[in-house]
Image: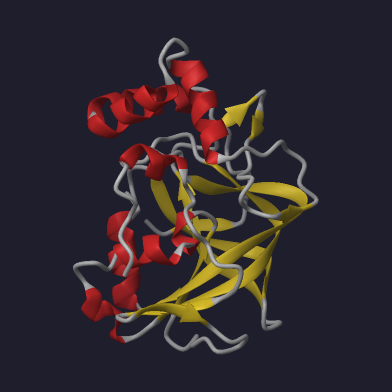
Amino acid sequence: MTSSPKCPIEHAKSYPFDIPEGSYVLDRDGWRALPVGGHETTRRHAVIASGSNAAPDHLGQKFKDYDHLLDQPVYVTRATLHEFDAVYSAHFSHYGSIPATLAHAPGAQANVFVTWLTDAQLDRVHETEAVGTNYDFAHLHDIHLAIEDGTILNAVHAYLSRRGCLSREGRPVPLSSCQTDGRQWTAMSQCEVLNYARSLIAPGEAKDDFIKAGIDSPALRAKRTNELTKSALPHGWQTLIFLS
């Protein structure tokens, strides 16, 4: 599996990292393209990936010391999620990026991915998602999720930010890397959103210095996250169950 870029600052700026155009399968040998309809769904949990969990190298890093869990492949399929958009969460990750979450967006159709995980794989991903701190694991109901093979799901799992959605002028901020039809809010790249956060929290600090300081200091990162959460917005979807 490919490792993360050596420069932590550039790595932070590159979120959500390299995401393929199509579906793929990840196993102990790495990742490769997956034919439409070639995924396994039996005894699998369907979990939306709206940010970096759709990137094979990043997803693979979660199993770096647990590669036995990839004896059964992880299938990752393209899908279209109606009435939602992929937006930035109101928190900083330990690697310096502002990561993604989902927000209810009437009329929108977001191009996302779905990871199909075994019980053991899901347990491992939980450990990497700061569940209970930055994210809740939720079961979304009454949705319309169209898998690229034509399958329609009306319920699915997702990691939703406990911190809320990052707010800019009272609106969520979508990821420009996520292609969404009917988008109603102004999107930003990772570099742009980090610069926006810097302007709110430390306007006199150089951007790269701002990123590095957040990576180096968990205490500072937590303080900055608390600043972002003061104006954070709710995800807005009502029919869901929080599982953890």
Judged from this view, the residue extending furthest toward the front is 6
Residue 220, quarter of picture: top left
Q: Nearer the viewer, residue 232 or 199?
A: 199
What quarter of the picture does the N terminus occupy?
bottom left
Residue farthest left in this picture: 65
Q: Residue at x 56, y 66 (%)?
A: 113
**Residue drawn at x 52%, y 39% as measured from the top left:** 190
Q: In the shown orientation, is residue 101 left or right of residue 201? A: right
Question: Is residue 227 placed above or below 122 in the rendered structure?
Answer: above
Relative to 48, does residue 117 appear above or below in the rendering?
Answer: below
Q: Position of residue 143 (x, y in %)?
A: 67, 64
Q: Nearer the viewer, residue 118 or 210?
A: 210
| Quadrant in which the C terminus is drawn | bottom left
**As drawn, 32 above or below 96:** below
Where is 34 relative to 214, above or below?
below
Residue 60: which quarter of the image?
bottom left
Q: Is residue 146 left or right of residue 193?
A: right
Q: Position of residue 171 (x, y in %)?
A: 67, 31
**Going 62% across and 85% down the picture, which residue do you hit?**
36
Residue 161 in percent (x, y) is at 47, 45
Front residue of this view, candidates 147 and 139: 147
Q: Residue 98: percent from the left, percent from the top?
A: 45, 38
Name the colour scheme: secondary structure
Residue 11 is drawn in which quadrant?
top left
Q: Which residue is at a point 41% across and 59% down the rendered structure image?
A: 243
Q: Is residue 7 left or right of residue 179?
A: left
Label tally: 0
